[in-house]
Structure formats: C-alpha cells, structure tokens
Image (cartoon, grey):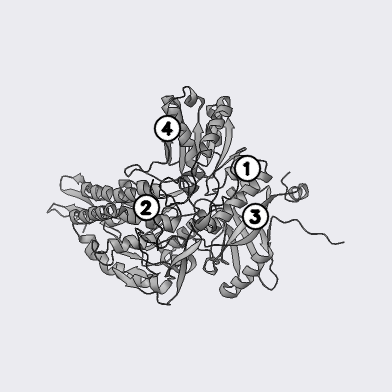
C-alpha cells in the first residue's frame, strides 16, 4: 500500500519547473521565508548556503524536484513559524518582479506562498495537537 | 477636480525617455553588459520605459565615481553643503507636478498623495537636514587642566543605499538627505518595481550636486543589489525592505565590519478605546479617518495600521461607522485628484494580497467589506487594483501576523487596557502603532507600553522631519527622519591633546 508522508511545505508544478531552470543557472538552491515590509511574506530563493541559517531558524522540509540532484531546503525563522505552524504551505510562482535578492526576479516571475489549514492527521504528524 | 494627462499623451507633465541608463558621476552611463529591463506602470499594467539592468561591473563604476567625489564633498563647508540641499528642495518644489506625476505613474499611488505628501515631504527633508547639519556641533571633554579630548564629526565616505518601491522618491530622500548633509557620497540601488522616478529627480538636480555625490545603478537584487551590499568599498549600508533580505544585508555587512541600518516593516496595531465615541464630534470623525488610514498608499506602507484593536463595549457601533467610512473610499484613476485609492505597485503584490484573502477565509475571518480584486474600466482594466478590505477575526490568525502590504485591515476586540496591550505586543514586529483615546493618561500609558518605535497618539501616518522613525524587535535597526540619523552617517574623530610640556616620566 502506498502512503505519503505528511509535509509542511510543497511545490506546484510551475514552481518545480522554475526551480529546475534556476538550478541550471545558480546551482543548488535554498528558500528562506521572509516577513515584514515590501516584498515580505514571500519566500526568498538563494543559492544554497548564501543565506546563513542558525539556531533561530527551522527547516520546514527538503523540497525534491525531479531532475534536480540536491534537495532544496525551505527555512523560516522559528519565531515566525510559531504563527504559521498550523498551515501547510505550497510554493507557487506568479508573474511579477520582486525586489530583494531572490534569484528568480530577473526571469520576470516571483515565488509566492499558497496556504491551507493542515488536516488533523497533519497536525498530529507534526505534534501540533 | 483635475485629471492629469498620462505620460505619453498631450499635455503630460512629465516626458519619460524611451530608455534610462545608470546615473554615474553626474551623467548617463550605459550598463556594461548592455542589458535593460522593461518598467511597467501598475496603473495600466503596460511598460512605459526601459531601465538599465546593472551588474557588479556597473556598481564598481558607480563606486569609482563616488570615491572620486568623496574627499571633496566631505571637506565642503557645511554651509555650502546645506545650501546645496536647500537648492535641491527648491528645485523639487518648483517641479512639484512633474515629480508627482512621475512618481504616481511609476508606483500607482494617487496623485493627491504625491502632490500633498511624497514630494513636499521629500523637499522638506532636504531642508531639515540642511538646517540640522549647520546646527550640529562637536564636543570637547576636559580630561585635566592640560589635556582635552575633542570630538569631531567626520563623514563615513562612500555609503550604499537600497531603496523600496512603496515611496520611491521619499524613501530615497530619507536616506540621501542625511548622507549628503553629513558629507558622504552615495551609490543608490532603487527597487526593480520603481526604478524610474528617482532618475527623473537625479537629472533634475544634476547641476546642483557635484558629479559623483549621487550615483544610481538600477538592476535586480541578485545582480546589482548584492554587489553593492557586499562590496568592501562602502563604509555603511542602509536598507528598507523585508526581513530575509535585511538579514542577508546584515550578514554581508558583518563580513566587511561596517554598520548597517535596516527598516523592515511591521504589523502595526491601531488601538481604539471606547471613549473615542463619547461624543459624535470632530474627534470621533478624526478617529474614523485614523482607522481608515490602513488604505493609505494602498496599504503599501511599512507602518500600515493593519491590525485594528477595538474595545469590546463599543465594537459594534464603531465598526458599523468604520465599514461605512471604508465604503466611501474613492478608487479609480490614480491621476485624478479625487482618487483616494490607486493601484498596487506590481502584479506579484496583487497576487500576494489575494492569497491572503484566501487563507483569511480558510481560518474563519469574516469579510466585513471588500475582499476581492477591483476591476476598473478602459485603460485601467489591466492595472493592479484591490478593494479596500476589512477582515474580522483574532490575533492568532495569519492575517493578523503577516504584512500583507495591501489595503487590508484585520480587526479584533479587546476587553480592557491590559488585554489591549497584550494583543498589541503579540507580534514579531514593532515599527508603528496608533492609540486613540480622549483620556490623556490612558493614551500616554498605552503609547509607552506598546513595543514599537513610533506610536501615534490621536493621529496616524504623519511623517514630519524631526520625529525619529524606526523599529523595535524584528522591525529593524536605526532611526531615520531625525538629526539622530546623522550619527548613522558619521564617524567620531577624537583628538586627545596634551597642552603640557611635562613628560610622563615612564621612560
């Protein structure tokens, strides 16, 4: 029987396609979810290791993209996660142009988070009940 | 009522070039790689010019020009530097309509705001720092009868500034005026969404500033912004934007051991105590406007009062009045002086706001008014417009905790003073806040108890020069808008001088 492991973060097909392309340009990648002003509340995509994560951050999941050798970790500050943890996140992509140092901006697109409430099973799996 | 002509049409106040190069050493310089990107006006969703796609090589050219100009500008007498700033202010006001139309077209905000706020405030900011630098004094400390420590203010030299898109000219000027006043030269990187209006200003004041004092390189963050922020050739970096980029910039600054100022936004609470409705008078009317200011600049303000906290015992009547006030907001052509709510600055902003409407409803927030994209007619049909929106819920919902940067307010009830302060401070951020009460003691105490750098008491969204502005908690480091910002752009030189002929006697 096939079972899928619950996740805290996923990708749309379009986002996966874009990540394949960006990996070709920049090499292995990572995400850090931003907060605050302007382009905040959106995920920032950096070359892996460019952004220093630390004890203040949590890895919400390692995203796998077909055709990309390295996983793409999705990070968020722990303080921010406290307010976000009951929601499942999906990285999507829309037309636009973010400022900030996210690698997709020159492509005329911007990563965007879609959210949904976690199911009871998901909340249980992540010890959130 | 006036409707300004769109740029490109007869009678337009501003004529954009077909293409903008970088502004380096007082002249236009083509980007070394020869690449450009299209600049879209959010008013129609169509491109109106193209702008240099600068890279590290262009940042180096700008740094060359800034370093060449820095020694001379830093030693220019403060009276002369102040005169330059005052002349810039005069030039801005002499071209108020031109700059206001340019800013509105680049950003999407209503012309009534650019005419009355963005551009006049920018001019006043130059005047304020012209005055502040002339009044600034060093200090001396008498160590003993023969020994004196003199403290001189010296410029840092060449500084980097990365500017947001919500007030493209005003936010640039908040950083440029103190930097110039203090005797620094600047390499400035505008936001990708609004790269043009600041270039219109740079060209307008070209004859007033020595070449190389102001250098502007456009481009994408990863290609130009990073090259500037991580350069060992700057002595300070200033940034307004979001937290991840803020951390990344601080990380680069730590590698170069240079100071950084950051303004990173917030989720500002706006508290309404029941006594505001004690009378249905001018003050009550002002408080309702204070609530509605969440829609100012389409909510694209770091201090947007995006969490309204309303006391339980008058919640229903106040919210009925507040919804009615929001529903009177005039949304339309941003070039019409009657328009109060214009376009969001970009499509990705629009999409982000719509994604928050989605999670708000999933979490059970109630939409009291608005809650959808606004569709305008004709030329404006392709623009990025959102209805002013009031959501009702509780402070643990994500729309109460995250900066949506749209004309959206999330409203919750509080029972008493302690409950109000507890909810107000239950946030990662601490940039702005508002307190509304007829009771001076309550208003004072709340103002002191809220953990935010700017608390407006019985007003909101005023940004006069001479009132310090900056964040607590995750909202940033530094205080703009005030002479204390000069400290962020100056070194202290201490001359420790002995006036004694006597040796120490140690050797």
What residue is shown with label 2? B170
Query: Percent from the top left, x then y, of residue B181?
Result: 26, 54
C-alpha separation, residue under disc 3 versus residue under disc 4: 37 Å
What residue is shown with label 3? A114
Query: Percent from the top left, x then y, of residue B251?
Result: 47, 60
What residue is shown with label 4? B458
Q: Which chain letter goes with mark 2? A: B
Query: Percent from the top left, x then y, of residue B89?
Result: 26, 52
What residue is shown with label 1? B397
Q: At numbered mark 1, what does the secondary structure look like: helix, strand or loop?
A: loop
Eye-nearest disc, 1 or 3: 3
Q: Nearer the viewer, residue A24 or A54?
A: A24
Q: Are marks 3 and 4 on the same chain?
A: no
Against B309, residue B125 (above or below) is: below
C-alpha separation, residue under disc 2 versus residue under disc 1: 33 Å
In the image: residue B333, left or right of residue B367: left
Q: Earlier in the sequence, mark 2 or mark 1?
A: 2
Task: Tell me if label 3 and label 2 are in contact, CB under 8 Å.
Answer: no
Against B46, residue B445 (above or below) is: above
């Amino acid at each position: 029987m096939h079972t899928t492991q619950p996740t805290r973060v996923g990708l749309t097909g379009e986002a996966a396609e874009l990540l394949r392309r960006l990996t070709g340009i920049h090499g292995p990648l990572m995400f850090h979810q931003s907060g605050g002003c302007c382009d905040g509340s959106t995920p920032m995509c950096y070359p892996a290791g460019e952004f220093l994560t630390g004890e203040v951050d949590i890895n919400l999941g390692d995203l796998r993209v077909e055709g990309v050798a390295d996983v793409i970790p999705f990070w968020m500050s722990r303080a921010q996660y406290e307010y976000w943890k009951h929601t499942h996140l999906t990285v999507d992509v829309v037309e636009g142009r973010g400022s900030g140092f996210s690698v997709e901006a020159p492509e005329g697109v911007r990563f965007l988070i879609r959210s949904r409430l976690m199911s009871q099973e998901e909340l249980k799996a992540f010890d959130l009940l | 009522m006036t409707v300004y002509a769109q740029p490109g049409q007869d009678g337009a106040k501003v004529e954009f070039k077909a293409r903008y190069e970088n502004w380096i050493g007082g002249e236009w310089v083509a980007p070394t790689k020869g690449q450009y990107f299209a600049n879209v006006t959010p008013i129609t969703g169509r491109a109106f010019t193209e702008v240099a796609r600068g890279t590290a090589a262009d940042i180096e050219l700008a740094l060359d020009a800034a370093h060449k100009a820095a020694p001379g500008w830093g030693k220019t007498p403060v009276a002369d530097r102040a005169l330059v700033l005052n002349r810039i202010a005069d030039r801005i006001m002499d071209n108020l309509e031109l700059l206001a139309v340019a800013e509105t077209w680049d950003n999407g905000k209503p012309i009534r705001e650019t005419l009355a706020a963005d551009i006049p405030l920018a001019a006043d900011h130059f005047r304020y720092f012209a005055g502040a630098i002339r009044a600034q004094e060093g200090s001396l400390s008498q160590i003993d009868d023969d020994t004196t420590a003199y403290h001189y203010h010296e410029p840092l030299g060449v500084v980097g500034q990365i500017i947001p898109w919500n007030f493209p000219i005003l936010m640039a000027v908040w950083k440029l005026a103190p930097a110039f006043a203090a005797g620094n030269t600047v390499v400035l990187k505008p936001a990708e969404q609004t790269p043009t209006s600041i270039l219109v200003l740079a060209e307008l004041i070209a004859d007033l500033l020595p070449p190389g004092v102001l250098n502007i390189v456009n481009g994408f963050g990863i290609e130009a912004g990073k090259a500037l922020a991580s350069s060992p050739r700057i002595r300070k970096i200033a940034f307004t934007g979001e937290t991840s980029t803020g951390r990344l910039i601080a990380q680069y600054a730590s590698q170069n051991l240079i100071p950084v100022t950051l303004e990173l936004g917030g989720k500002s609470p706006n508290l309404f105590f029941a006594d505001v409705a004690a009378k249905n008078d001018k003050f009550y009317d002002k408080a309702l406007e204070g609530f509605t200011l969440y829609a100012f600049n389409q909510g694209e303000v770091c201090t947007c009062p995006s969490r309204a906290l309303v006391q339980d015992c008058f919640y229903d009547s106040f919210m009925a009045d507040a919804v009615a006030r929001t529903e009177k907001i005039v949304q339309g052509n941003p070039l019409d002086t009657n328009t109060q709510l214009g376009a969001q600055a970009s499509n990705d902003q629009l999409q982000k706001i719509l994604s928050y409407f989605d999670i708000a409803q999933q979490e059970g927030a109630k939409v009291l008014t608005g809650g959808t994209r606004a569709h305008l007619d004709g030329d404006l049909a392709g623009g990025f417009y959102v209805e002013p929106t009031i959501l009702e819920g509780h402070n643990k919902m994500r729309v109460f905790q995250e900066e949506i940067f749209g004309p959206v307010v999330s409203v919750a009830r509080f029972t008493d003073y302690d409950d109000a302060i507890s909810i107000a401070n239950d946030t990662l951020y601490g940039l702005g806040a508002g307190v509304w009460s007829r009771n001076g003691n309550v208003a004072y105490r709340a103002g002191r108890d809220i953990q935010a750098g700017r608390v407006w008491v019985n007003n909101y969204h005023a940004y006069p020069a001479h009132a310090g502005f900056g964040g607590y908690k995750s909202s940033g480091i530094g205080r703009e808008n005030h002479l204390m910002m000069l400290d962020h752009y100056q070194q202290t030189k201490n001359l420790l001088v002995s006036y004694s002929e006597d040796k120490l006697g140690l050797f």
